[in-house]
Amino acid sequence: MNIAHKKNEKGIVLVSVLIIVAMVGLAVSLMWQQQASNLNSTKNIIHTSQTINYLYNLEVWAKSILRNDDAKVDHLKEDWTTIIPPIEVPNGELHGRIVDVQARFNINHLFSINNDSTQAYLNPNYMNCLNKLNASLKQDFMSDFIIEYVNKQRPIEKFKHLSALRKIEGIEYKDYLKIKSYLTASSLIKTVNINTASKEVLSCLHPDLSISLAQNIIDKRPFNSLSEAKTAIRQAIGGGSQSAFNKNLISINSQFFLLESDIRIASSHIKVETLFHRNARLLNVISRTYEQISSD
């Protein structure tokens, strides 16, 4: 039995145990229902205590995995990358996975705001980033649409949630869906984990870092120290670059993780994104985003 298979079985067994616990006692759901009642966007999403408890137990699973993980280095061969396949439960099924949010490019790095918050400017080092990420899209000027939108806001400020891109004229929803997996939006997330980022995201870190050069970096992963990672980037870029690399933009570990849960119980079908912040062995929920899936 290979290691990946053992990891997968371990994750499934743990979730299954948590589900049994959820079936025995539903007390925690009262707290969740009270929270849900205070969120207008979730009034029609969570219909049963059963659904709420399954979500709660998926979060318990995620916390357990991340709490026991070695936080010094995070890469794609660790237990937290285990995907929970669809598990049948009474009247439905659930599945989920943990995603490293720091494997994504923070859209707020795209622009800078002047001291009196009256004007935003595209950062020249990253202005071509979205063009690299959306190479499969028809839009060539997504960065221009974004900076135009930001400058129309009062006060001018950074994005608090990636879903704000859906409000921007010129960015179609279907294109937003294609690019969102590469991006995040947060004032808290400062670095990109070079051990988990895709070649597309890595190519955003420097104007001279092409996707093919980024693949060369990926081939050398995982990096166990920042010095190793920085050396790999310098070698990929070469000595002829006119732009300095921002060494403060990368890390080899992560503090922010996203649990993507998909739960269907009878007529209730929800997708939930739970954002965790990990500080040592302490896991805190930063936010939850709920989406109700139509039965049509």
Image (cartoon, rainbow, N blue to C red):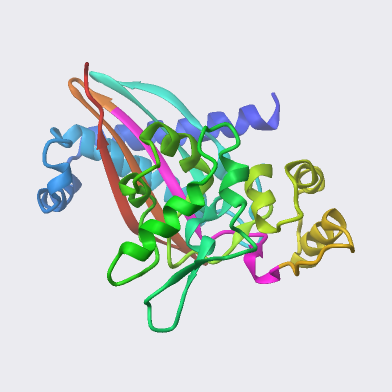
Instruction: Using the image, determine if residue 15 lies above or below residue 88.
Output: below
Q: Return the x and y of residue 99 as percentages of the image width and height.
A: 50, 44
In magenta segment, residue 175? no
Viewer-proximal residue, 252 or 281? Answer: 252
**Rendered residue at 41%/23% (across/down):** 86
Residue furthest to the top in view is 296
Q: Is residue 222 left or right of residue 184?
A: right
In magenta segment, residue 261? yes
Instruction: Using the image, determine if residue 262 lies above or below residue 106.
Output: above
Q: Return the x and y of residue 124 as percentages of the image width and height.
A: 62, 64
**Rendered residue at 36%/57% (across/down):** 149
Quarter of the picture containing the C terminus is: top left
**Is any part of residue 78 visible from this angle?**
no
Quarter of the picture containing the N terminus is: top right
Viewer-proximal residue, 98 or 1? Answer: 98
Magenta residues (range): 246-263
**Is any part of residue 66 visible from this angle?**
yes
Residue furthest to the right in view is 239
Instruction: Using the image, determine if residue 161 lies above or below residue 49.
Output: below
